[in-house]
Every structure is written in C-alpha cells, then in structure tokens.
C-alpha cells in the first residue's frame, strides 16, 4: 500500500459553514501584502479579491482576457492590478508569469481559484482532457513558474472540491489523461479537483524546512457561473432548489480567504480545509506516492508543451 499523508483533525477555529469572507478576515490588516488570484472576474474569485482588497492587500487578478480582468479589478475597494491568463493556453500562462515577474511583485499568497466544471462532452487542450489541463496543469505551470516570487512566508491556496471523491478509483487515471478511453463529466471534474488537492499536498511537502505553506480548500457548493457548462436539467435543478443547499459567494469565499490570510491557518498547512477547518479527504487524496507521481508526470507534460 502506498504511504499516506498524516491527517489530524483541527481544533475549532471559531468559523464555520455560515461564516463569510468578511467575517473570517475581520480585524486583519493586509496592508503591504500582495496576493495573486486566478479567476478574478466572477463568483468566488471576484469575492475573494474584493475582501482581500478591502483588508488592504494589493490584489493581482487574472482573467482569460486582460479586458475582463481590468473590469473586475477596477471594481475593487483597494488596489488591484489586472493580468491576462488563460489557463488552457500555455503561452498565456507563461506570458502572465513573465509579466508579474517583470512588474517586480513579491507574492505573499497565490490563490488558484479559476476553473471549469462538468463539461458535457469531451474537450481537449494539447491532447489532454480540458478540465484536467485547465484546472490542474495550467495552475501547476503558473504557480511553479512564480515560486521564485513567493515570499519566504508565502502561502499557496488551491481550490479543490468535495467532488474530488468522484475521481476514478485509482485516483488519477494516468492512462487516460486525454479522456479518449472513456469520458464522464463528473469523473473527469473530480479527477481535476483531486489533482488540485494532491498538488497542494506535494507542494507543502516540498516547502518543508521553510515558512511557506500550501492548502487545498473546498469552498462549499456555491452559487456561481461555474455551473454554466452543466446540462439543462442540472442547471434547472440548481435554479429550483439551490437555496436549500448552496452557499452565496460571501460564504463560499470564506475558507479561501481564511487559508490565504488568517494566522490560524498556519497550523493547518498541507491539509484539506472545509468551513475553515481541516477535514479528512478521500483515501486517494492522502496518498503521498500518488501526489509525487502526479507532480513528476505534470512536469513531463509541461516540458513537452509547445
């Protein structure tokens, strides 16, 4: 059996399911801090940027186009800088990294928020299933490309999901990263979210001996436009019954903001956070050998990209 990462349930943090991003950051001063957030243009990313900016952080927000990112950053209550970053386009990711480095930013936190969900039919980028490529490979490229700009006590926060438990039984199906040997919208989405969780876990292992920390978070099932790719029946269900189980974005962004900025999060580094506390993820998510293999395979994928 592959070695597993340790899991220790966390003590109560004073925050929970109904806490908002503003509540978990109340009293914090992020003045002088710089935080990069992917997917700043809507939903959880937009709220995360707003609250971090409200607390004084200089927010670097990315969108698939510069115009969309500029529009979102212009609405922030504090300082914001916009960058184009299409995570499915390696050239765009490289250009974003280069531009952030050129602008001289030292990053106190990187939040990997952007993503796509449950594409109804198989789509690919560079021969890989699009959710895996966008949600995982694109973020891997961006974040590893900026680690030299991460502060000595910087944090990396990856948005995973409870859906990571819907990944294939093997965890990551390395023999079907293209999706051509079988495609299921939720299985492939779950695989991409498991990859986000494993990336954070392995990154924390690689941060050992430093003050840097990494986290994977489940924001809660939030009412955002992430569901825009879902079929009509699923969208209709959300419209009719969403108020019974969906968080609004103010609550959905709370755990992300907690991980990115709150002092209490430091003791939870390397864990999977839900409602601002550590919870046990799936068995595959605790597989340290799988996390290392995914890192190595992703490095190979990135090396082969045009």
Image: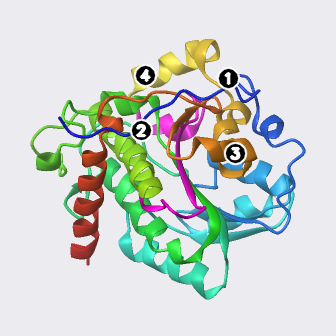
- Left or right position of 77 against 142: right
The count of marks equals 4
Tell me the quadrant of the picture where the N terminus can be found. top left
Q: Say whether marks 2 and 4 touch (CB < 8 Å).
A: no
**Which structural element holds mark 1?**
loop
For the point 60% across and 29% down, the residue is: 10
Mark drawn on residue 234: 4
Furthest residue toward front: 209
Mark 4 or 1: in front is 1
Q: Say whether marks 4 and 1 touch (CB < 8 Å).
A: no
- Expressed as whole percent of the image width and height from the top left, the position of residue 47 reads 72, 45
Structural distance between the alpha carbons of marks 2 and 4: 10 Å
Tell me the quadrant of the picture where the C terminus can be found. bottom left
Structural distance between the alpha carbons of marks 2 and 1: 26 Å
Q: Nearer the viewer, residue 50 or 118?
A: 50
Structural distance between the alpha carbons of marks 3 and 4: 29 Å
**Which structural element holds mark 2?**
helix
Which of the two discs, 2 and 4, labels the residue nearer the N terminus?
2
**Which structural element holds mark 4?**
helix
Mark drawn on residue 229: 2
* Disc 2 crowd, CA 10 A, few/some/many (<14, 14-19, 20+): some
**Magenta segment:** 206-230
For the point 37% across and 54% down, the residue is: 136
- Left or right position of 197 against 48: left
Residue indicated by mark 1: 17
Q: Is residue 34 above or below residue 230?
A: below
Which quarter of the picture shows residue 248? top right
Determine if residue 43 is in view: no
Residue indicated by mark 3: 257
Which of the two discs, 2 and 1, labels the residue nearer the N terminus?
1
């Amino acid at each position: 059996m592959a070695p597993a990462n340790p899991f220790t349930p966390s003590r109560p943090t004073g925050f929970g399911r109904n806490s908002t991003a503003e509540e978990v950051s109340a009293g914090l001063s992020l003045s002088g801090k710089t935080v990069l957030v992917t997917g700043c243009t809507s939903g959880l990313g937009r709220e995360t940027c707003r609250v971090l900016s409200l607390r004084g952080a200089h927010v670097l927000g990315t969108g698939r186009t510069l115009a969309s990112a500029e529009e979102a950053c212009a609405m922030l209550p504090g300082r914001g800088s916009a960058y184009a970053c299409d995570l499915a386009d390696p050239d765009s990711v490289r250009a974003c990294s280069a531009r952030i480095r050129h602008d001289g930013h030292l990053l106190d936190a990187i939040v990997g928020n952007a993503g796509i969900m449950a594409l109804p039919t198989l789509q690919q980028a560079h021969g890989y299933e699009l959710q895996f490529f966008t949600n995982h490979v694109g973020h891997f490229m961006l974040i590893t490309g900026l680690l030299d700009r991460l502060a000595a006590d910087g944090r990396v926060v990856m948005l995973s999901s409870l859906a990571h438990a819907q990944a294939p039984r093997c965890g990551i199906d390395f023999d079907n990263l293209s999706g051509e040997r079988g495609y299921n919208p939720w299985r492939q989405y779950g695989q991409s979210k498991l990859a986000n969780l494993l990336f954070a876990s392995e990154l924390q292992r690689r941060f050992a001996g430093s003050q840097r920390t990494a986290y994977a978070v489940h924001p809660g099932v939030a009412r955002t436009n992430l569901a825009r790719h879902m079929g009509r029946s699923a969208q209709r269900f959300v419209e009719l019954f969403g108020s019974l189980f969906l968080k609004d974005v103010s609550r959905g962004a709370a755990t992300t903001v907690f991980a990115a900025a709150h002092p209490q999060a430091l003791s939870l580094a390397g864990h999977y956070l839900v409602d601002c506390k550590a919870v046990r993820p799936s068995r595959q998510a605790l597989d340290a050998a799988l996390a290392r293999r995914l890192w190595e395979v992703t490095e190979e994928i990135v090396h082969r990209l045009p």
